[in-house]
Amino acid sequence: MAAVAAMILAAGQGTRMKSALPKVLHPLLGQPMLFYPLRLLADLGIEQPVVVVGNGREAVEAAVGAAWPGAVFAWQRQQRGTADAAAAAMEKLAAFSGPVIILCGDVPLLRTATVAALLDRHRERQAAVTVLTAVLAEAGAYGRVVVDGAGELERIVEARDATAAELAINRINSGTYCVDAAFLRRVLAAIDCQNAQGEYYLTDMVAKAREAGLPVAWLDAGDPDEIQGINDRRQLARAEQVLAGRIREQWQLAGVSISFPDQVLIEPQVRIGQDTTIEMGVVLRGRTEIGRGCHLGVGAVLSDVRLADGVRIMPYSVLEGAEVEEGCQVGPFARLRPGTVLRREVKVGNFVEVKKAELGAGSKASHLSYLGDARIGRGVNIGAGTITCNYDGFNKYQTVIEDGVFVGSDTQFVAPVTIGRDALVGAGSTITKDVPANAVATTRSRQVVYRDRGMAYRTAKKEKE
Ligand code: UD1
Ligand code: CA
């Protein structure tokens, strides 16, 4: 198979987004819009696409460069139209011969298979240009595709230059093409800007190929959703819904149960094991990996989290950068922050916050605690209201609680401090010094009881007033 080159046109302004952020960097499911065509090309094995940048150039280059090190940038200094943008890209493909795929940076729903089919059609027909078209009920502002009596593509006319009869055509130009590099170089030099917008139209290459007697081909996208361009934030939100729906369906077909799926959001890089169930309002972000047979309760939000098999996340828990082993139970209303590691069968209950802390197998913190910068062994019971005081206003310190320790409720550990194996800490203690293994530590003052003094105390109070 001959090599294939590609360019993504992304220099346009995106005025209708009404934003300080360049249009192609607006995120869909946590990823800039422009990453979708980049991923499509990577799926086709094209690792060094040319990205045409202009508006917001520095921000676009920084974002793309960080995630797609192979990308090559072509700077279109002034946005004089799509043909001018393609000409900027061709400067970076000066030595290339073969087919060039042209995509737009603001068309994130396009599928890899569709572009692969376009390339196949281009090769079969040995065409100079092959255009991805679509049939729409409402052709709107898209360029119209004029086909002659023999079913051959004759030309593309922009909506603003079209006659009433041409506007009635409902086959449109998607803005995605496959073009022979040598032909593209020649034709770009010949395109002028004699049109309603005074722009250099890439679409003129079709009529020019016909004039030169070169074969032109076209292919209808099966699913018109795919070619949807994004110009404003309504279209952005709609496209995000379509993408989210595709991802949910993929996981449903892979054996994941999702109830009320419209209310569940799963980002593209998330992985989920079979027989996991997901309830409404769950959000899974970043590089989250979920094992088999897990249960994610209503409203759970997970970012960059690893769950092993059989983990239960109860409703309204928020987990970020945490690792959770087999059989753990978390929440409801728990918060696991980055650096949390829960070993097998750990239980973290409601209103418990954990940060940079490991809890050993079978340990429990069931209610109302903060465990930060801590190493907690196996089989430890953390009573309700336990706090690790890890910060003195200047530095953070570690709390170490060894295997088998029992911590009574409402205990503070003023770090750095170590509690030895099997020790017991009495409820309501403020622990400032290490506790040896197997010891009992308590810091409470002794309780004083005055018998039969309750009513007398009340009478004395009333008389004072
Ligand atoms: C273009 C097509 C139209 C098609 C539509 C599909 C032309 C003349 N028209 O119109 O037939 O139906 O796409 O969405 O090509 N860009 C640059 N530099 C420029 C101008 C544009 O990089 O100087 C980029 C834009 O960032 C965008 C893409 O090219 O990603 C398309 O440009 P846009 O202005 O949106 O073209 P349309 O008017 O929508
Ligand atoms: Ca436009």
Image (tube, rainbow, N blue to C red):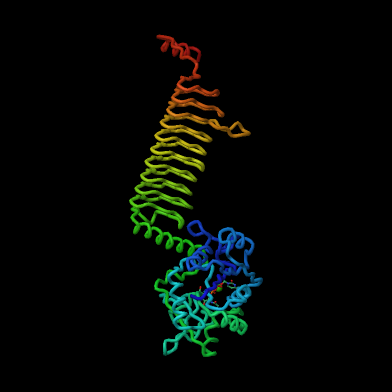
Q: Quadrant of residue 208?
A: bottom right
* Residue 219 shown left or right of residue 48 in the figure: left
Q: Quadrant of residue 330?
A: top left
Image-quarter location of ligand 1? bottom right
As drawn, 318 above or below 120: above
Residue 453 x/y as whole percent: 42, 10
As drawn, 461 above or below 102: above
Whether residue 165 is visible to the viewer of this picture, yes or no, is no
Residue 351 x/y as whole percent: 44, 36
Q: Nearer the viewer, residue 263 or 183?
A: 183
Kindly identify the residue that appears in the image at 48 percent across and 49 percent down.
304
Number of residue marks:
0
Residue 147 x/y as whole percent: 45, 85
Q: Nearer the viewer, residue 298 or 272?
A: 272
Kindly identify the residue that appears in the image at 36 percent across and 47 percent down.
294
Residue 151 x/y as whole percent: 42, 86
Residue furthest to the front: 1
As drawn, 14 above or below 291: below
Kindly identify the residue that appears in the image at 50 percent across and 56 percent down.
30
As drawn, 354 above or below 215: above
Residue furthest to the right: 77
Whether residue 29 is visible to the viewer of this picture, yes or no, is yes
